[in-house]
Amino acid sequence: MVLTFGIHKGKKLSDPDIPDRYICWLAKPKYSGMFYRSLHVTDLKWRVPWPVKEAARVEAERRGWTLSGETWAHDR
């Protein structure tokens, strides 16, 4: 899947240039403002589209991450 928004717009989720923490952020059940900053209050309610979230979860798991509750942990 190619990202159509954000700092990695135009890149595939499988691109090794996309950091693991960004992939995990996309797939996270709840969001922090780590990768999304806005001065507009209405933009703060923005959410990652469901198909991107699902694809990011698959990619995170492929990279060795496991979701436990609301936190991703690396299987090392």
Image (spheres, rainbow, N blue to C red):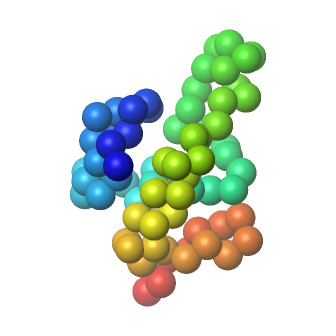
Q: Residue 61, percent across and down? A: 46, 73
**Residue 8, visible in the rendered structure:** yes
Q: Give me the residue at 34% from left, 33% from top.
A: 9
- Picture coordinates of residue 73 (x, y %)? 56, 74
Locate residue 48 relative to residue 74 in the image: left or right: right
Q: Is residue 35 left or right of residue 38?
A: left
Name the residue located 67 percent from the left edge and 75 percent from the top edge: 68
Residue 19 rendering spot, x and y as whole percentages: 37, 54
Residue 21 to residue 43: above or below? below
As drawn, which residue projects farthest toward the front? 51
* Above or below, comparing residue 46 to residue 28 in the picture: above
Residue, x 73% and y 17% (percent of image)?
42
Quarter holding the C terminus is bottom left
The image position of residue 62, as x and y in percent, is: 38, 73
Q: Is residue 74 above or below residue 34?
A: below
3 on left or right of 29? left
Q: Is residue 60 left or right of residue 1?
A: right
Front position in the image: 5 or 34: 5
> Relative to 4, does residue 59 appear above or below in the rendering?
below
Q: Is residue 34 visible?
A: no
Q: Nearer the viewer, residue 30 or 57?
A: 57
**Residue for point 28% across, 34% down:** 10
